[in-house]
Image (cartoon, helix red, strand yellow):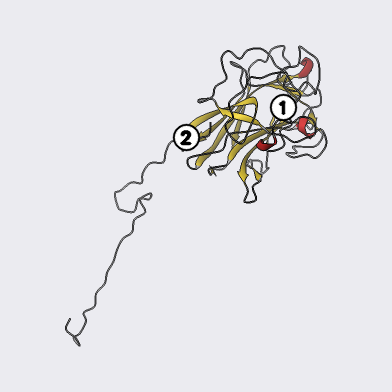
Amino acid sequence: MAAGGARAYQQIQSDVVDGSVAQVKGATAPPAAPSQPIPYTLSDTPCAPGANPRGAPSNHLAHNTLGSCSSGVQSGATPGAPDRLYNAERSPVPSSQTGSFDFSTDVITQAPADEGLQTPVQPKQCEYAPSRSTAGLQVHRWVTAPVTGGDLVLDGTASLTLYSKTINAALHTAKLCIWLFTREPTITGGEADNLIADPSAGTSYFTYSSGLQNWNAGPGWGAPYQIPLSFEELRLEPGDRFGLAIAVDSAGTPGEALQFRYDHPGQDSVLQLYTTTKATAPN
């Protein structure tokens, strides 16, 4: 317009579209990525900060797994490294790895009846971090390697396939405490465990019971227990680990402690998770 002339009214409009949401009539949003399973096998190999190849199992004192991966292997009352959860698709149990091993020779000595990990009952209900001197025998933890290359999204569907039987073929019921957690680095250089809630029970742990039936008493290991687990969708960032812990609850286990078999070809205990970002799943 010439200087001093009347300026005509103008209106400018623009649409900004979120590509993940259908905004235009007749358009559809991109489909969500399907969830894919990731099987993690329980191992007898302690975790470590760096490269952590799977080792061969052996007979030994029970690993105290209540510390950090940098603590190394410890037993007795000293908190040490949790054992590792290995991605079964990338680091399976070697088929040549045969034989029965006792992962807690200091719990009870009834060879050859002792196999795998023997876990005494907890005197209190589902304590994730008890302070008593025997805590390292009563809670056992496993963690994955840290997430790398991007966020890992878990859809909240999970299951635990667990080989277990009573010690000395004792006949009694049993109840397990199960924790799922993330282990995240802190700004001070430490680590913090964040327990994952069971939304159906409103607790920071899951339980599994044989009910009125006796727990598997052997003589063999029989079929594994299939334990469904579910939680809210979860996102792990690079550097985070996913963890599992188990204990035997005295509230539902009146008799001898239980034992668990893992790191054994053909009879391996597995934690199965489901993710929409499988490429970033840790080994």
Q: Position of residue 157 (x, y in %)?
A: 54, 35
Q: Is residue 137 left or right of residue 156?
A: right
- Image depth: mark 2 or mark 1 in front: 2
Relative vertical location of residue 69 with respect to residue 116 in this rendering, above or below: below
Please, what is the three-letter code of the amino acid marked with disc 2?
A: Lys
Nearer-the-camera pick, 78 or 157: 78
The residue furthest bottom is 4
Quadrant position of residue 179: top right
Residue drawn at point x = 61 percent, y = 36 percent: 49
Residue 87 visible within the image = yes
Q: Is residue 95 left or right of residue 45?
A: left
Q: CA distance from mark 2 to mark 1?
A: 36 Å
- The numbered mark at residue 99 is none
Please, what is the three-letter code of the amino acid marked with disc 1?
A: Gly
Nearer-the-camera pick, 262 or 191: 191
Residue 231 visible within the image = no
> Could you classify mark 2 by the number of other residues whose Cα lies within 10 Å: few (under 14), some (14-19), or many (20 or more)?
some
Q: To which residue does mark 1 refer?
A: 211
Q: Is residue 11 left or right of residue 48?
A: left
The residue furthest front is 50
Instruction: Check contact, mark 2 vs mark 1: CB within 8 A.
Output: no
- For the N terminus, the quadrant is bottom left
Q: Position of residue 162 (x, y in %)?
A: 64, 24
Nearer-the-camera pick, 161 or 61: 61
Q: Position of residue 163 (x, y in %)?
A: 65, 21
Q: To which residue does mark 2 refer?
A: 278
Q: Position of residue 195 (x, y in %)?
A: 65, 42
The first of marks 2 and 1 along the sequence is: 1
Q: Is residue 162 left or right of residue 15?
A: right
Residue drawn at point x = 69 percent, y = 12 percent: 220
